[in-house]
């Protein structure tokens, strides 16, 4: 299959730029023009044409749409990735073909920066412009970009391409390769099936000359399992409440492929993992992290017995939620907010044991974090170290950089922990102290090795959570007892124009329409532990209302009052939602 291509090296000396090198007289503009013409010609010859397909925008999740709308976009993103690599002096960059938790019929793509970060915002605009150029305007659009961005065409581009298990992904990954190959000189490596975090890991390894780990899928498995094994070897060997058995729902996606490679190593390290929905059924259908989080129930094909632990990853394995059945056989969810608090709690314990006082350990949440989780975080870390960011992982990631140890998770289970260089240096110094201080510092650094700092990574988070629960000797019941969620509701209100809504303070306050926030505040004041906010959707003409209060009855009344207010004062359309 197409997973065995290894490296397709597309360096042909007689290519577009070969003739340019000798004659410096030929201006950059001319070489940009001929390079752009070549790309347009390859696009046409290989059938990667836009035709009358709709325009799409590169957003937080990259491009995402029905798979049949994407061939020309994936070709052009191959071109853009080659440009990005050239602009960065030939550093390897990545292209992932996935639509994450969307249904099987969809697909998409996102680009990965050298250290595993997201594409810079200004390049999102370039991606959108290139994707939406008509076939006739492709050469001109590309030429303008090459000149504007001062792309040195003589630099050899290096691009790594990963893909998920969707039936459309192999073909779309080849379209990316055609795109990379059309902008000579360039090299492309087809990784084959990989999770999104595995691609981020590989790109980061290549850019750190192996400093981050060995750049292969086997290297990824060995690094995580090895780090987990070292970490638990240094903690108590016997546990009472913690049982080393875990069931993982793989959403019938690529996470199952990655986890299967790791099972023997985890078994040797003393963690017995069983996989459910590991490829036998349709992707994300009645299973996966998103399904479990939204439906608040166990996925299909995963029966829960009281006390047993389970986790669900999404289609490309970059988010995870945990859940269990309590003694009364009630389903209990342990979401991203709870994962963040568990990890922060344990990291705080280790810092204290290592007597490292002056590092800033904190949590980044979004407005959707439950009020009880925020209160618990403030108790644990202090109000100054609990930050709120706008919805979206890139905003959380950016906010976490202000901390020495920054845990950020969205409630949906997407997130990770970032460690500053100062933090790592301080703990390396503490290891030298020896004794109980040295042991705690070493455990802290080993836990860091289990965590994938490049990106939210479900498999890495699972291993971190398992190591922490084991070390604390906690079952899910102790974890759940950190706080009790306030009852909450999320409601969509359809409006005629979402453009009239404007928010500030990490989307927690509405500044437009004028007077709306004052009215919301007046309503909220009448409810104990009440909180509500209104924010426009980024993708459709709806406004999202969030409300929470001390009791279910109060929450329903608060949510309905805010829904009524928005509907009546801000152009509600159709039936007014009834909150239940």
Image (cartoon, grey):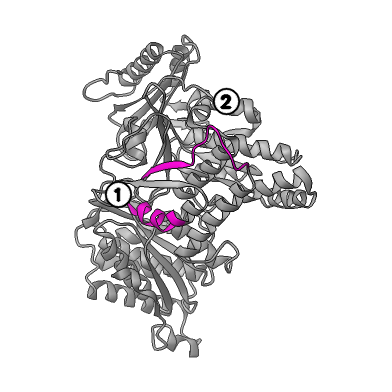
Residue neighbourhood size for the residue with mark 2, other residues' Cα within 10 Å, grouped as few (<14), some (14–19), many (≥20):
some
Find out whether residue 2 is within the magenta segment: no
Residue neighbourhood size for the residue with mark 1, other residues' Cα within 10 Å, grouped as few (<14), some (14–19), many (≥20):
many
How many discs appear? Answer: 2
* Quarter of the image that includes the N terminus: bottom left
Q: Which residue is mark 2?
A: 376
Left/right of residue 380 with respect to residue 151 in the rendered view? right
Query: In the image, which residues are magenta?
Result: 236-264
Is 470 in front, or is 414?
470
Which of discs 2 and 1 lies nearer the camera? The answer is 1
Residue situated furthest top in the rendering: 526
Residue situated furthest left in the rendering: 52
Residue 506 vertical placement versus 60 (above, below): above
Q: Is residue 57 visible?
A: yes
User: What is the CA distance from the residue labelled 2 to the residue labelled 1?
Assistant: 35 Å
Residue 352 vertical placement versus 373 (above, below): below
- Local secondary structure at mark 1: loop
Dots 2, 1 in contact, CB < 8 A: no
* Quarter of the image that includes the C terminus: top left
Is 484 in front, or is 406?
484
Q: Position of residue 507 (x, y in %)?
A: 47, 31
- Taking the spot 47% from the left edge, 56% from the top edge, the residue there is 119
Corner quadrant of residue 569: top left
- Local secondary structure at mark 2: helix
Q: Which residue is mark 1?
A: 252
Q: Position of residue 159 (x, y in %)?
A: 43, 69
Find out whether residue 248 is within the magenta segment: yes
Q: Position of residue 113 (x, y in %)?
A: 49, 60
């Amino acid at each position: 299959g197409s997973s065995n291509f290894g490296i397709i090296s597309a360096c042909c000396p007689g290519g577009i730029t070969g003739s340019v090198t000798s004659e410096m007289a030929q201006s950059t503009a001319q070489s940009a023009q001929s390079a752009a013409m070549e790309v347009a010609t390859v696009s046409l010859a290989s059938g990667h044409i836009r035709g009358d397909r709709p325009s799409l925008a590169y957003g937080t999740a990259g491009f995402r749409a029905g798979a049949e709308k994407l061939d020309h976009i994936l070709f052009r993103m191959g071109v853009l990735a080659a440009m990005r690599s050239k602009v960065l002096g030939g550093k390897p960059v990545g292209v992932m073909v996935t639509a994450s938790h969307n249904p099987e019929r969809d697909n998409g793509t996102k680009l990965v920066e050298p250290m595993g970060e997201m594409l810079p915002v200004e390049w999102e605009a370039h991606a959108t412009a290139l994707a939406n150029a008509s076939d006739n305007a492709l050469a001109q659009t590309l030429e303008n970009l090459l000149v504007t961005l001062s792309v040195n065409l003589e630099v050899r581009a290096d691009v790594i391409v990963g893909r998920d298990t969707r039936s459309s992904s192999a073909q779309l990954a080849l379209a990316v390769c055609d795109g990379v190959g059309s902008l000579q000189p360039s090299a492309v490596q087809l990784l084959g099936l990989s999770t999104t975090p595995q691609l981020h890991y590989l790109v980061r390894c290549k850019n750190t000359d192996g400093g981050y780990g060995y750049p292969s899928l086997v290297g990824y498995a060995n690094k995580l399992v090895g780090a987990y094994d070292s970490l638990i070897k240094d903690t108590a060997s016997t546990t009472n409440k913690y049982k080393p058995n875990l069931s993982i729902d793989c959403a019938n996606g690529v996470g199952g492929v990655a986890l299967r490679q790791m099972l023997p190593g985890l078994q040797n390290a003393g963690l017995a993992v069983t996989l459910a929905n590991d490829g036998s059924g349709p992707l994300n259908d009645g299973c996966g992290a998103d399904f479990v989080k939204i439906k608040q129930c166990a996925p299909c094909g995963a029966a829960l017995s009281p006390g047993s632990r389970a986790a669900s990853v999404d289609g490309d394995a970059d988010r995870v939620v945990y859940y269990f059945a309590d003694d009364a056989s009630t389903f209990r969810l342990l979401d991203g907010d709870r994962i963040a608090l568990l990890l922060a709690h344990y990291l705080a314990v280790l810092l204290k044991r290592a007597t490292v006082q002056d590092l800033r350990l904190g949590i980044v949440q979004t407005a959707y974090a439950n009020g009880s989780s925020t209160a618990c975080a403030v108790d644990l870390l202090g109000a100054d170290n609990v930050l709120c960011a706008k919805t979206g992982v890139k905003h959380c990631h950016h906010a976490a950089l202000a901390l020495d140890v920054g845990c950020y998770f969205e409630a949906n289970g997407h997130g990770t922990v970032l460690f500053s260089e100062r933090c790592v240096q301080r703990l390396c110094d503490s290891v030298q102290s020896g004794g109980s201080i040295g042991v705690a510092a070493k455990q802290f650094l080993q836990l860091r090795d289990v965590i994938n700092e490049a990106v939210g990574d479900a498999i890495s988070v699972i291993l971190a959570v398992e190591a922490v629960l084991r070390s604390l000797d906690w079952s899910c019941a102790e974890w759940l007892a950190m706080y009790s969620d306030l009852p909450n509701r999320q409601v969509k209100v359809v409006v005629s124009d979402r453009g009239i809504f404007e928010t500030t303070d990490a989307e927690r306050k509405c500044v437009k329409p004028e007077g709306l926030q004052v009215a919301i505040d007046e309503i909220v004041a009448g409810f104990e532990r009440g909180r509500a906010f209104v924010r426009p959707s980024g993708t459709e003409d709806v406004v999202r209302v969030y409300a929470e209060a001390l009791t279910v009855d109060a929450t329903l009344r608060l949510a309905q009052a805010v829904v009524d207010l928005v509907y009546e004062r801000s152009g509600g359309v159709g039936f007014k939602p009834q909150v239940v």
